[in-house]
Image (tube, helix red, strand yellow):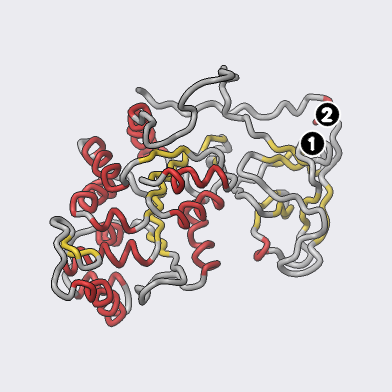
Amino acid sequence: MKFTLPNYRAPDFTKEELKNAPNAVLKPAPADFVAPDDYHATTIFPEYFKVDGEWVLPKRSRMDCVAVYENGEVYVREFRHIKKGDKIAVGRTEDGSEGIYVHPNGFTESEEIQETFAFRQGRSRETAFSIDYDFLYELLRHERDNGYIVWVMGPACSFDADSRRAFTTLIEKGYVNALLGGNALATHDLEGAYKSTALGQDIYTQAVMPNGHYNHIDTINRARYHGSIEKFIEAEGIDNGIVYTCVKRNIPLVLAGSIRDDGPLPGVYADAYEGQDAMRVELAKATTIIAMASTLHTIAAGNISPMYFVTDENKIRPVYFYTVDISEFSANKLADRGSLSAKSIITNAQDFVVHLGKVLGEG
């Protein structure tokens, strides 16, 4: 299965209803962090705003934000980044009649035939995922050379020796451009390198070690003693694992904390909005996102990410988003939260990573 990017079909702005559409109304923000009444809330889709007779597409977008016109460009910004006086697009229609046009079908090659009645149209543990894996192998090979692959991970892969090694292989082979997670992912991966356990269990045999429940806290405490993850790795002779490989290969590692974190490790964002902003820096560059076994981080990443990406050459391409989880609820949750372009694979995240490592690690 050879991978090719689908062509993007831009709206036909010569149509009378778009050609004769009015300019979008831009109103100043009445105060910092406050949008004007009837503000337009952005979606995951390409959206065009008519300004001075020209239709303008924001290059970087996300859902549930506002469109700010500034210096000839439209920027999509979170409410917490609104400044008093920002020129913000207002209007609650999306068909161009108010100078705002949402274009959800730009990558649709043709109308799919839909049966009135058919079995197994959803995605569940009974779904056959062979074609998804084959497509994903070729997609990742393409993205390694042409895109930016962001992984969003819970701690599950750090609990198992084989999945830790497999993900390390994916990093070394160039299939990881950034890694987003929480305190637990880094803590238990570093615990695996430091103590050969994860939450006190041997990462290979799963045997419970004596006083093993101390191991993750000891790891955090020692890292805080050294002042940073990087200094901990160097001082304690850490030489394996996901975090170690990211650090050694200068792969961006964004760790956004949660209210129940132990410690946390140095470098974990304790402020939720600082963490979200740091995640957005990497997700704004993403052309493929794979989110595994972390419902909250997955939903966060999905809500930050649009379904399109504008390249440096001003070409528009899709952003591929995969969710991987053993729970059907978790893997399919993004579809309920507005990220309709996400595709779910229902499987054990550790097995998924090992599978990819075996196939992609060969070349």
Looking at the image, residue 245 lies above or below residue 72 = below
The residue indicated by pointer 2 is 17
Residue 341: image tag: none
Q: Residue at x 82, y 38 (%)?
A: 53
Which of 158 and 96 lies nearest the eye of the viewer? 158
The image shows residue 175 at horizontal and vertical percentages of 32, 44
Task: Answer few, some or many: residues within 10 Å of disc 2's Cα (few below 14, many 20 plus, some between 14 and 19).
Answer: few
- Can see residue 159? yes
Q: Residue at x 65, y 29 (%)?
A: 10
List the single residue furthest toward the bottom.
225
Which of 26 and 108 lies nearest the eye of the viewer? 108
- Can see residue 114? no
Looking at numbered disc 2 in the image, what kind of residue is underneath it? Glu
Looking at the image, residue 10 lies above or below residue 282 = above
Looking at numbered disc 1 in the image, what kind of residue is underneath it? Gly
Q: Residue at x 51, y 72 (%)?
A: 271
The residue indicated by pointer 1 is 96
Disc 1 vs disc 2: Cβ atoms closer than 8 Å? yes
Is residue 240 toward the left or the right of residue 151 in the image?
left
At numbered mark 2, what does the secondary structure look like: helix, strand or loop?
Answer: helix
Q: Residue at x 33, y 41 (%)?
A: 347
At numbered mark 1, what does the secondary structure look like: helix, strand or loop?
Answer: loop
The quarter of the rendered structure image containing the N terminus is top left
The Cα atoms of the two marked residues, 1 and 2, are separated by 7 Å
The image shows residue 171 at horizontal and vertical percentages of 28, 49
